[in-house]
């Protein structure tokens, strides 16, 4: 794996080894097994805590070592993870736990993503199927991961804006998102490097979401979302766009085209479209977390999507199909359902609104006193609901697993896990 922590022109590379994740079938760890780069519960446990883990700065760039009671299945190799505004780690192996943040002064979290496909056949503009337009030239360049992973596009045409483009399979009528890394943009003020999708409506890509103003030394990830039309399916990159044609150059790397309303991590491709499978995270010691049919948990998460951008209900905690806590796609409400031998009960919040990466704190409890659900949004609403009459004891799942930010098939959407804690219930 490699990581860049400087500008587009001055890279430093670090190679690290190991998967960084608990293997399938790992034995449950005792409270206190925190894992590298995260904080687990310790001998001085908060009152009543059984098991807990919280994200912190990873010991290895972009990689966490999880405690034994958490098992991650992430089968796709050669993944990436963003670790700041200007850098990402590439070459992340299968089943590694990815530590993500998008701002240099932001918090890290464990990245858990849904299945996605990158429809751009070659994610770096270097060779065919990429094609040049006017007097554009292509060369290898160092990317935001510190490797030679970028394409340097130079405009040698003083009369017209040169570019390079790649054909992609269209998905007419689909809402899709283009993303990519842009860096080392030469030129004068007023010019800009630009990523365009010729299958999108122009309104979706004619603003700062798709542009990096010149001059700009540091790497930056841009993204934009639009509805694909019947126009030719092509992704274009311009090193020198603007009102006045000029000679310039810019570097582009890790371009994605995904059928989704928001971007996920970069999916490198080398000749054809490529799919990244969903991540599956479980607490593998459910028998210790569900006591006599009752449970209590606290989650802190940061959805990578804003309200209205998710396409599926997103499970936050999943014990079985009748006992789960999820973020509902239709209206943005958090819903808690509990089902046992004596019946079922549920709670739900009002519709919620939030921005991409806005943190949530979700507290749930099912006890002899009834159900309790509390949702707090950072700089937003704080909603608490209780149902004293709804006391439903649940069985421990046969698998012994409680799924976190997904169900048995994996994460339905993309989010960062900042903290997870399970408590005694009396």
Image: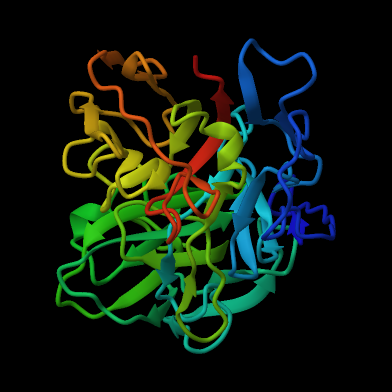
Horizontal arrangement in the rendering, residue 282 relative to residue 229 (left or right): right
Residue 376 coordinates in the image, percent (x, y): 38, 18
Q: Is residue 196 above or below residue 49?
A: below
Q: Is residue 101 visible?
A: no
The furthest residue to the top = 47
Q: Nearer the viewer, residue 359 or 247?
A: 359
Along the viewing direction, whichever of 382 and 226 lies nearer the viewer: 382
Lateral position of residue 155 relative to residue 353, left or right: right
Residue depicted at 39% across the width and 67% down the height: 257
Instruction: Name the quadrant of the N terminus.
Output: bottom right
Query: Looking at the image, which residue is at 28% across and 78% down?
Result: 233
Give x and y (percent) for residue 168.
35, 80
Instruction: Please report the residue visible at 37 percent of the width from the left and 44 percent of the height from the top.
Output: 315
331 above or below 231?
above
Q: Is residue 121 visible?
A: yes
Observer-nearest residue: 56 or 212?
Answer: 56
On the image, the x and y values in percent for residue 157 come to: 47, 74
Residue at 27% x, 14% y is 386
Furthest-bottom residue in this view:
128
- Asked if residue 273 lies left or right of residue 261, the reply is right
* Residue 68, quarter of the rendered image: top right
């Amino acid at each position: 794996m490699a990581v860049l922590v400087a500008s587009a022109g001055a890279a430093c590379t670090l190679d690290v080894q190991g998967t960084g994740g608990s293997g399938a079938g790992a034995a449950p760890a005792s409270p206190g097994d925190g894992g590298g780069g995260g904080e687990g519960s310790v001998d001085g446990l908060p009152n009543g805590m059984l098991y807990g883990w919280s994200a912190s700065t990873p010991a290895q760039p972009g990689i966490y070592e999880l405690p034994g009671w958490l098992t991650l299945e992430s089968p796709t190799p050669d993944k990436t993870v963003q670790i700041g505004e200007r850098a990402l780690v590439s070459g992340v192996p299968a089943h590694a736990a990815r530590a993500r943040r998008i701002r240099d002064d932001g918090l890290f979290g464990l990245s858990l993503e849904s299945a996605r496909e990158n429809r751009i056949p070659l994610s770096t503009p270097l060779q065919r199927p990429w094609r040049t337009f006017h007097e554009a030239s292509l060369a290898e360049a160092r990317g935001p991961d510190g490797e030679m992973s970028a394409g340097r596009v130079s405009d040698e045409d003083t009369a017209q804006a040169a570019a390079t483009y790649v054909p992609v399979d269209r998905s007419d009528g689909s809402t899709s998102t283009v993303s990519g890394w842009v860096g080392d943009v030469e030129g004068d003020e007023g010019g800009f490097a630009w990523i365009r999708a010729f299958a999108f409506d122009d309104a979706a890509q004619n603003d700062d979401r798709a542009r990096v103003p010149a001059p700009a030394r540091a790497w930056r990830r841009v993204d934009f979302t639009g509805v694909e039309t019947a126009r030719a399916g092509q992704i274009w990159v311009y090193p020198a766009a603007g009102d006045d044609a000029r000679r310039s150059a810019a570097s582009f790397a890790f371009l994605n085209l995904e059928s989704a309303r928001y971007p996920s991590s970069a999916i490198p491709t080398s000749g054809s479209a490529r799919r990244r499978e969903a991540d599956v995270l479980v607490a593998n010691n459910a028998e210790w977390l569900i006591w006599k049919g009752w449970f209590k948990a606290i989650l802190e998460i940061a959805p990578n999507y804003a309200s209205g951008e998710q396409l599926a209900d997103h499970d936050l905690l999943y014990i079985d199909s009748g006992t789960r806590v999820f973020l509902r796609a239709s209206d943005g409400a958090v819903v808690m359902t509990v089902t046992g031998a004596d019946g079922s009960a549920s709670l739900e919040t009002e519709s919620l609104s939030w921005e991409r990466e806005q943190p949530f704190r979700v507290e749930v409890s099912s006890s002899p006193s009834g159900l309790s659900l509390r949702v707090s949004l950072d700089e937003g609403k704080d909603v608490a609901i209780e149902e004293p009459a709804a006391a439903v004891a649940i069985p421990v799942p046969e698998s012994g697993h409680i799924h976190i930010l997904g169900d048995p098939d994996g994460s339905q959407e993309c989010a960062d896990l900042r903290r997870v804690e399970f408590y005694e219930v009396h």
